[in-house]
Image (cartoon, grey):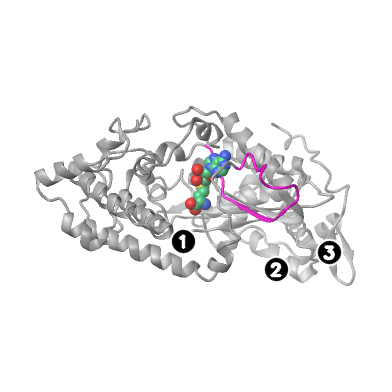
Amino acid sequence: MKDEYIKKEPKTKEEIEKILKKYPAPKKLVLPKGSDVKTVDKLFSDIQMARLALLKQIIKKQKNDNVRKSLLLMFSGQVTRVNLTYHASSYVKTENGGNAAAFQYYRYRIAPVPKDVDFVKTFELRYKKVIAAKKEMEYFINDKTISNVQILKGTAVDLSFLHNESVDYIYTDPPYGKKIPYLDLSMMWNAWLDLDVTEQDYELEAIEGGEHHKSKSDYSNLISKSIKEMYRVLKFDRWLSFVFAHKDPEFWHLIIDTAENCGFEYVGAVPQKNGQTSFKKRQNPFTVLSGQLIINFRKVRNPTAVMKANLGMNISDIVMQTIEGIIAKNNGATLEQINDELIIKGLELGFLDLLKKEYSDLTPLLLTSFDYDEQTEIFSIRKNKKFRTTVDLKLRIRYYLVSYLRRMEKERKTSNFDDIVLEIMPLLKNGITPENQTILSVLKDIADEVGSNGWKLKQDGQLSLVGCADINDN
Ligand SMILES: C[S@@+](CC[C@H](N)C(=O)[O-])C[C@H]1O[C@@H](n2cnc3c(N)ncnc32)[C@H](O)[C@@H]1O
């Protein structure tokens, strides 16, 4: 293939014109509104277009279906790098490194100085990467497994091809509201790869906004429907892991609410870092979160919903307490750590619905209350200051105890007093450090001793639905 391409590669104006006449160019699909040019073909110079058209033609000739499709996958990566939106990156300094506008700006922006990559070398690199990926997967996806695998294009909203209670595990990574209009942005690749996107695809896409102006309630409805479908097909006592990175607590509430209404039981949430900071994050350190949370649910016969704990604090105290706790525990915390902690505590203690709008952007609160180090992106306690919280020490202890014991309960563990002290002391340092006796007295208030030196939350009474007027202030 390489030999054939090099032999035919167009260099002169005439050669370019000849190729453009001979081989089909991509469909002139109309690009989304925010784009710098109207149609897909305008995203390429003549030479880029001719080279891509020639390469595609050579790939299309491959008779073996697997080989041809793998080559088209490499070609898709080639399209990403050979177009007028691709430009040098300020942080990836490799020869071919750069950024394509659709991934970076979420719109088709023509680069002021497009990067002209070495076409053959770029394709060779794609080739190496796809081969390396295949090698890595070989152990899991091989001749034996492939005969049982079904990969379907469809919508999570309709899983009618699956029977009730037939699935062992679900791992899902849905779109996060209006962050990325996937179908709108996939136009450039769809055009080259001859992939059809139908009106129905747009209708079923779970996003907010985009070219089809989908509303927040369109998004919520589609996500809710898909959770219901997931519940239907999952076997009992099996797990659903839901990846989510939305900033708006309202969406978190929607997910938990829908999942619980369907009959799922919340089991816990774990932060997952992807190990790299995106361009978006660097550009907007305060509005973009890197990493995400994985929320785990279980489909059980008698699910218990997360109950609102009566913490005796109003929501602003809870927020400040949570932030101070994570900062104290880690000697400083990033926006992501703080956000994750708030969501997790909100999930565990049932105050997610109270975290609404005013806490969807924590930045003003954080910047006025804590020191921020631009280099490390860490918020920490102001020099020579104690924490601001005015919340009574016993209430603060109660807050962490309820949260910790609830988590232990979910994990079906009991904790002894030493474990408990070890867990909550770091969260309270920097304030007035409590005596063990104080912790014990709060513990006795909300938990029962079981066995020898084990502690379990009292079942009702103490932890009934929120009674505090302040907390109910929605
Ligand atoms: C956060 S991304 C997932 C990214 C993926 N995990 C990966 O690493 O490439 C969300 C994906 O959900 C897809 N999506 C949108 N609406 C959908 C629906 N109704 N059913 C299934 N998938 C949908 C989007 O096209 C997008 O690819």
Q: Calculate the distance from the C-alpha at mark 1 to the C-alpha at mark 2.
A: 29 Å
In the displayed structure, would residue 335 be above or below residue 42? below
Circle number at residue 455: 3
Label 1 beta carbon less than 8 Å to ligand 1: no
Q: Which residue is drawn at 56% across and 35% down?
A: 204
In the displayed structure, would residue 140 be above or below residue 346? below
Mark 2, residues whose alpha carbon is within 10 Å: few (<14), some, or many (≥20)? few
Q: Give the range drawn in magenta.
A: 156-177
In the displayed structure, would residue 209 be above or below residue 381? above
| Position of residue 239 in the picture relative to residue 81 (left or right) | right
Q: For numbered disc 3, what is the local secondary structure? A: strand
Q: Mark 1 points at which residue?
A: 275
| Position of residue 350 in the picture relative to residue 50 (left or right) | right
Instruction: Work out whether mark 3 precedes mark 2 in sequence or the reverse, and give the earlier one.
Output: 2
Instruction: Work out whether mark 1 precedes mark 2 in sequence or the reverse, and give the earlier one.
Output: 1
Q: Are marks 3 and 2 in contact (CB under 8 Å)?
A: no
Q: For numbered disc 2, what is the local secondary structure? A: helix
Tell me residue 39's x, y (percent): 30, 32
Tell me residue 463's x, y (percent): 83, 48
Q: Mark 2 points at which residue?
A: 422
Mark 1, residues whose alpha carbon is within 10 Å: few (<14), some, or many (≥20)? few
Indicate whether residue 171 is drawn in magenta: yes
Indicate whether residue 390 is drawn in magenta: no
In the displayed structure, would residue 473 be above or below residue 466? above
